[in-house]
Amino acid sequence: MKKLIPLSTPHVIGVDTGLSNGLACIRGNNLVAVWQGPPDQVRDQLTIMILSCLDGGGSLDIGLLPLIAAERFTNRPTQGQPRTTQGDAERVLGVVKDVAERHSCKLVLQQPSSVKKFAPNSLLYRLGMHVKGSDIGQADANDINDAIRHALTATATSYAVVFDDMLKAIGF
């Protein structure tokens, strides 16, 4: 039987934005919800995920609202090229910011390179959180795995004791 999770254990939702998007919600050692799809569905899917975090014992107490973590975008010049943009990702991030604000959720923005280094595939596998495309009926689950990385990094920085427990559970 899986260890019961105290009600005070936070939910952390990771968001990977772009032409294809990923959402992943973790709570303690558990990956509790994932989604991957197009930009026009992010608003509804993120709202559903937030409301699901409050269902089943949650309350509207601000302390129990999920933390949302997403990629920080920086438009930067490439060598000898004009500045690069990721229009879809930036538009979706605007939607994420709006949904987070409407539901009084804290939103943290993270550098993608830091997140990839902090939570490589090997950590996702050890935690039992790596998702394959076949798990979700799609060709890949890359955006979900990137969303999981955002959620894990936010857990480590915002809820260090919870993250430490996650690592202890897998023998770190």
Image (cartoon, rainbow, N blue to C red):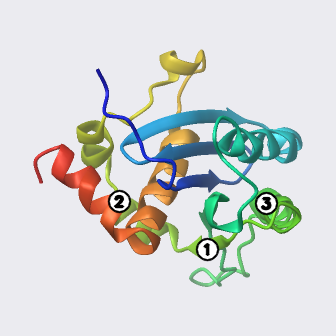
Q: Is residue 80 above or below residue 140?
A: below
Residue at the left extreme of this rendering:
171
Amino acid type, residue under disc 2 in the picture: Val
Q: Residues within 10 Å of mark 3 (few under 14, many from 20)?
A: many
Residue 123 placed where, x, y %? 27, 48
State the quadrant of the C terminus. bottom left
Q: Secondary structure at mark 3?
A: helix
Q: Are marks 1 and 3 in contact (CB under 8 Å)?
A: no
**In this picture, is 30 found above or below 115?**
above
Q: Secondary structure at mark 2?
A: helix
Instruction: Work out whether residue 66 or residue 131 is closer to the camera in this orientation and state it.
Output: 66
Q: Is residue 42 above or below residue 163?
A: above
Query: Of callouts 1 and 3, which one flags the residue occurring earlier in the amino acid sequence?
Result: 3
For residue 61, side relative to residue 142 (left or right) = right
Pick the front one: 85 or 140: 140
Which secondary structure, mark 1?
strand
Tag 1 residue? 109
